[in-house]
Amino acid sequence: MTEKIPSGALLARAYAETPGLPIEVCHIGPDAAQSLADFARAKCGATCLVVSDENTREAAGAPVLETLARGGKNISEKVLGGGHVDATEELGDEVAEAGASSDFLVAVGAGTICDLAKHAGTKLNRPVLAFATAASMNGYTSGITAVKVNGLKRTTPCTPALGVFADPAVIAAAPHRMIAAGVADFLSKCSAGADWRTANFLRGEYYDENALRFYEGILDQVLESAGRVGQGDPEAAGIVLEALLLSGLSMLVAGSSAPASGGEHLISHYIDMKQALYGTSNDLHGVQVGVATIHCLRLWEKVLALNPMTIDPDALVAVQPTDEQVQTWIEADWGPVAGEVLAQWRQKSLPGDLLRAEIMRFRDHLPQIADAVRRDLLPATLVADTIRNAGGPITPDEMDAPLDEYNKALKFARYIRSRFTILDLAAELGVE
Ligand SMILES: [Zn+2]
């Protein structure tokens, strides 16, 4: 047993140690609705737009609306449909229109509702307060929105929420698949952190160890409480949400999603991009990320188990795909947006001599790299067991996404974004 840390203590520590965070408060507790209303009374204007969908309004709308009204706020509402709501730019603009005469916005929901409200708040230059209804992803505290523009999902910088509030009982009552997805999205930091550290070592990319301090102590708690998450335990749900809020803060402080988004996220984005372009199915972000994290951790295990003596840079460079081959693959995958994807790939593809130097640098520093990334990595089996205990899928055939797209993503997702990840390193080293 790890030492019991009171709920919210790690968030409180993060705030105490990091003056000037743009999100002024993150509060998890049974009094979350009251806390939001008190914060709004102290910090926000007289009129507000409450944004929700039919499901999240049913789950948590009443206490938020009542406490805001008791606090004297003049409330209008934007309630989106009860089915699948897509975070599109048009819908975000519609929310902005509805909120044009409000002093602030309140998002009652999870990823999609928060993204729409943050998009609108940024456009209107009005503060957004988030009342979380599920612990399914780490976007509540992020400074980006994932909104579809012309059918394609784009992550765009935005003004972060001014305050984030959550009641563990509401979070625990959300569908179990959502919180299991949240556990998986959080655990992806193991693989993403190793990718980020290695991108810094091999390619000199920006890295900030400081961003990782938010994770201290919370990982053990998530590993320990995953089983209770699967049983709908509010305390465990609060821990997962706290972990996700800390994960979002780490991205905010890094000024980049890199501490929480590596090769596993590219695999998930690949499936989402196919959905956006061709209408194929996709699953919750965290579900896809979890299955892909297990894959990436296995790749890491194979890469770190290589014997440097057997790494032959010339032979490896000789079998890399040519630029023409990659271009053909990208055109086949991405048709109308192939040009944009190709531009991402070309930002990180290396000519033969530099690729050879990179492989040599890896070979010559393998023990040193292994020591460093072990601070980030967890065993693939431990992550799989934890996601399973939380009630989430751990194999590709359990996801609501086409198996052939997932299998293609394992090979081709590295081409969709300029970020260097384990997918690149493994491909360069001939590891599958
Ligand atoms: Zn994520």
Image (tube, rainbow, N blue to C red):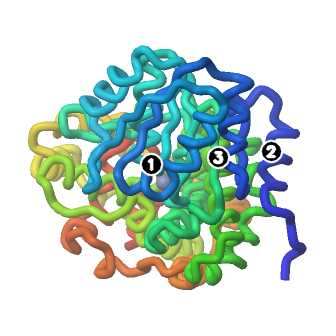
Q: Is residue 237 above or below residue 167?
A: below
- In the picture, measured across the screen, residue 197 lies left or right of residue 408, that is right
Question: Mark 1 or mark 2, which is nearer to you?
Answer: 1
Q: Is residue 284 above or below residue 148?
A: below
Neighbor class of circle 3 (other Cα within 10 Å; few <14, some 14-19, many 20+) is many
Q: Is residue 364 at least partly visible in the picture?
A: no
Residue 27 or 411: which is nearer the viewer?
Answer: 27
Q: Is residue 375 above or below residue 122?
A: below
Amino acid bearing label 2: Ala
Of mark 3 and mark 2, the one earlier in the sequence is 2
Q: Residue at x 72, y 59 (%)?
A: 372
Rendered location of residue 7, percent (x, y)? 79, 61
Rendered location of residue 94, percent (x, y)? 29, 27
- In the picture, measured across the screen, residue 185 lies left or right of residue 207, that is left
Rendered location of residue 3, percent (x, y)? 89, 74
Residue 233 or 155: which is nearer the viewer?
Answer: 233
Name the quarter where the N terminus is drawn: bottom right
Amino acid bearing label 1: Gly
The CA span between labels 1 and 3 is 19 Å
Name the residue beneath numbered marker 3.
33
Q: Residue at x 71, y 70 (%)?
A: 235
Is mark 1 in CB contact (under 8 Å) with mark 2? no
Q: Is residue 33 at least partly visible in the picture?
A: yes
The CA span between labels 3 and 2 is 22 Å
Rendered location of residue 406, percent (x, y)? 27, 68
Name the residue beneath numbered marker 2.
14
Helix, strand or loop at disc 3?
A: helix
- In the picture, measured across the screen, residue 428 lies left or right of residue 259, that is left
Residue 92 or 143: which is nearer the viewer?
Answer: 92
Question: Mark 1 or mark 3, which is nearer to you?
Answer: 3
Of mark 1 and mark 3, the one earlier in the sequence is 3
Q: What numbered label is drawn on residue 111? A: 1
